[in-house]
Image (tube, grey):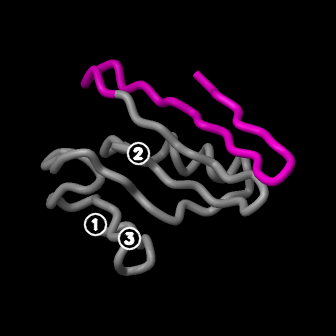
Amino acid sequence: MVFYVKNFLINYEIRQFENKGLSHYSDAILSECESQIVLLAPSRDIFPYLTYAQKHAATIIGVIKTHPYADFVSGHLPGSINIQDGGQFET
């Protein structure tokens, strides 16, 4: 599902992602004028977000989490994204 917020100063796109296996939804908020994305409650599989960012020539600049996720991107397991280290993917 995609929502568009447009006025004379800003253009935002909000894209919802579904992980059916986990019954989990997450969102990407894209600032079209800044080409930047913030992820809301991302799942551990980052490839849909990277594909979305690449499609829009945008950079993922942050993650907003609603609670601790031990098995998602913000979790403590290998394979998580460390935004504090410049968004580098840890293995």
Quarter holding the C terminus is bottom left
Dot 2 alpha-carbon crowd within 10 angstroms: few under 14, some 14 to 19, many 20 or more: some
State yes or no: residue 11 in magenta.
yes
Q: Position of residue 90 (x, y in %)?
A: 31, 69
Label at residue 91: 1
Judging by the rendered image, the residue that carries numbered circle 3 is 83
- The residue lying at 55 percent from left, 51 percent from top is 50
- In the drawing, does residue 65 fall left or right of residue 46? left
Dot 1 alpha-carbon crowd within 10 angstroms: few under 14, some 14 to 19, many 20 or more: few
Q: Residue furthest bottom?
A: 85
- C-beta proximity under 8 Å, tags 3 and 1: no
- In the drawing, does residue 28 fall left or right of residue 72? right
- C-beta proximity under 8 Å, tags 2 and 3: no
Q: What residue range appears in magenta?
A: 1-24
What secondary structure is marked by label 2?
Answer: strand
Q: Residue furthest right?
A: 8
Instruction: Compare marks 2 and 3 and give the one earlier in the sequence.
Output: 2
Q: CA distance from mark 2 to mark 3?
A: 13 Å
Q: Position of residue 27 (x, y in %)?
A: 47, 38
Label at residue 22: none
Residue nearer the viewer, 8 or 37? 8
Judging by the rendered image, the residue that carries numbered circle 2 is 40
What secondary structure is marked by label 1?
Answer: loop
Instruction: Compare marks 1 and 2 and give the one earlier in the sequence.
Output: 2
Q: CA distance from mark 1 to mark 2?
A: 22 Å
Q: CA distance from mark 3 to mark 1?
A: 14 Å
- The residue lying at 67 percent from left, 39 percent from top is 13
Q: Position of residue 12 (x, y in %)?
A: 69, 44
Residue nearer the viewer, 85 or 62? 62
Instruction: Compare marks 3 and 1 and give the one earlier in the sequence.
Output: 3
